[in-house]
Image: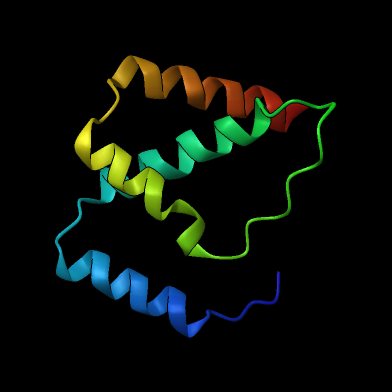
């Protein structure tokens, strides 16, 4: 990670703020996207690293349209925690 925040990412964050997108939607999008990446088929082409907030844009919209329940998010968090402890 370069430690720099890209202009496009700042603009997207500002857009999300201006639209009053709730923080839970962004948080859930990070969790869902990370879990999807973990579940990615290990035998297929490896996924490139996430380098931009724009990667999450579609998932954020998905969370706004149909937010998952607390149990689903907790289950995904548990999957991520188990993966991290390996």
| Furthest-front residue in this view | 44
Residue found at x 20% / y 55%: 21
The residue nearer to you, when weighing 44 against 39, is: 44
| Callout count | 0
Q: Is residue 33 above or below residue 76?
A: below
Q: Residue at x 53, y 79 (%)?
A: 5
Residue positioned 62% across, 64% down in the render: 51
Report the residue that reaches farthest toward the bottom: 7
In front of the other: 72 or 85: 72
**Side (left or right) of 39 relative to 35:** right
In the image, residue 86 above or below residue 1: above
Image quarter of residue 82: top right
Taking the spot 71% from the left edge, 55% from the top edge, the residue there is 49
Tell me the quarter of the image containing the N terminus. Answer: bottom right
Residue situated furthest right in the rendering: 43
> Colour scheme used in the picture?
rainbow
The image quadrant of residue 27 is: top left
Which corner quadrant holds the C terminus? top right
Relative side of 43 to 76, left or right: right
Q: Position of residue 34 (x, y in %)?
A: 57, 38
């Amino acid at each position: 990670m370069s430690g720099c925040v890209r202009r496009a990412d700042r603009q997207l964050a500002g857009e999300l703020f201006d639209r009053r997108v709730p923080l839970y939607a962004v948080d859930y999008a990070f969790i869902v996207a990370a879990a999807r990446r973990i579940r990615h088929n290990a035998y297929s082409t490896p996924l490139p690293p996430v380098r931009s907030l724009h990667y999450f844009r579609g998932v954020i919209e998905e969370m706004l349209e149909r937010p998952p329940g607390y149990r689903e998010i907790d289950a995904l968090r548990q999957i991520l925690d188990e993966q991290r402890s390996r």
